[in-house]
Image: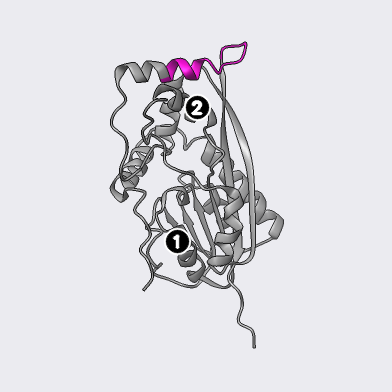
């Protein structure tokens, strides 16, 4: 009998995080903008021209707009969110692109299998999300705030070095794993936390730690500020991991 994946993330909190991000009146955010730009470049480079596409998580609408172009016969399905741990209703997409959602699924290998199964033979899948080398300054500040008894404040993220094995395990053909980093400078911990909430990158742990005490919050704020450069700003890192692969064509 197959073992059940541990419930690291809360489905309820994950949905709530997504809804909060979608309710913002601001632009989608620099992380999504970077992911979308990267995927547009990849599609142009590969000259992949899908007839039936599923775009999940691109609230900017730029991927769908680019695919539509002047070809009005293309079938493009857009979803702001989707249950990635359940089988998809169709299995004939030429392209599936998923943005910013794979970082908080309990069964990542299963989610990758579902993506592959939803592709038509020869179809391409692209998934981008925030990776494990992200938010080093914030992690350091939170650890120093509760050095004696650290609580779970930030959920674990995927190490890009583990991704190739995950893709092979999920049966993706021609798997490619890329990662790059964005560096953003912050004048305060509060502004970083605000950005994370607005972009839907907050903690969705099933068993989060208790609320920060007033004293711990001030220690975290001071520890974050102590990492500032001479100009008074802290450089924070966002690692973007992109997975690319295809569904094999049958061999006769």
Asked if residue 226 is positioned above or below residue 127 in the image, the reply reads above
Q: Left or right: where does residue 246 sit relative to residue 13?
A: right
Tag of residue 140: 2
Asked if residue 39 is positioned above or below residue 34 in the image, the reply reads below
Residue 72 location in percent, x, y? 54, 62
Where is the N terminus found, in terms of image quarters? Answer: bottom left
Residue 169 occupies which quadrant of the picture? Answer: bottom right
Residue 234 location in percent, x, y? 56, 20
Residues drawn in magenta: 220-232
Residue 176 location in percent, x, y? 65, 58
Q: Confirm whether residue 251 shows in the render.
A: yes
Q: Confirm whether residue 69 shows in the render.
A: no
How far separated are the C-alphas under marks 2 and 1?
A: 31 Å
Where is the C terminus found, in terms of image quarters? Answer: bottom right
Q: Which residue is mark 1?
A: 111
Tag of residue 228: none
């Amino acid at each position: 009998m197959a073992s059940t994946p541990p419930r690291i993330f809360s489905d309820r909190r994950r949905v709530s995080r997504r809804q909060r991000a979608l309710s913002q009146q601001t632009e989608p955010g620099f992380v999504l903008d970077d992911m979308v730009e990267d995927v547009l470049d990849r599609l142009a480079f590969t000259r992949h021209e899908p007839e039936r596409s599923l775009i999940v998580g691109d609230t900017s609408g730029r991927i769908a707009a680019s695919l539509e172009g002047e070809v009005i016969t293309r079938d493009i399905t857009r979803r702001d969110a989707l249950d990635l741990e359940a089988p998809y209703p169709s299995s004939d997409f030429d392209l599936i692109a998923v943005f910013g959602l794979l970082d908080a699924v309990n069964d990542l290998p299963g989610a990758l299998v579902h993506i592959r199964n939803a592709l038509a033979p020869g179809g391409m899948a692209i998934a981008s999300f925030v990776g494990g080398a992200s938010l080093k300054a914030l992690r350091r500040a939170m650890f120093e705030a509760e050095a004696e008894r650290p609580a779970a404040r930030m959920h674990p993220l995927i190490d890009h070095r583990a991704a190739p094995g995950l893709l092979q395990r999920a049966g993706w053909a021609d798997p490619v794993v890329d990662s790059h980093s964005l560096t953003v400078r912050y004048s305060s911990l509060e502004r970083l936390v605000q950005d994370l909430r607005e972009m839907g990158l907050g903690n969705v742990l099933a068993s989060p730690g208790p609320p920060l005490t007033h004293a711990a919050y001030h220690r975290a704020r001071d520890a974050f500020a102590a990492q500032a450069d001479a100009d008074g700003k802290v450089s924070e890192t966002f690692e973007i991991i992109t997975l690319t692969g295809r569904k094999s064509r049958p061999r006769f």
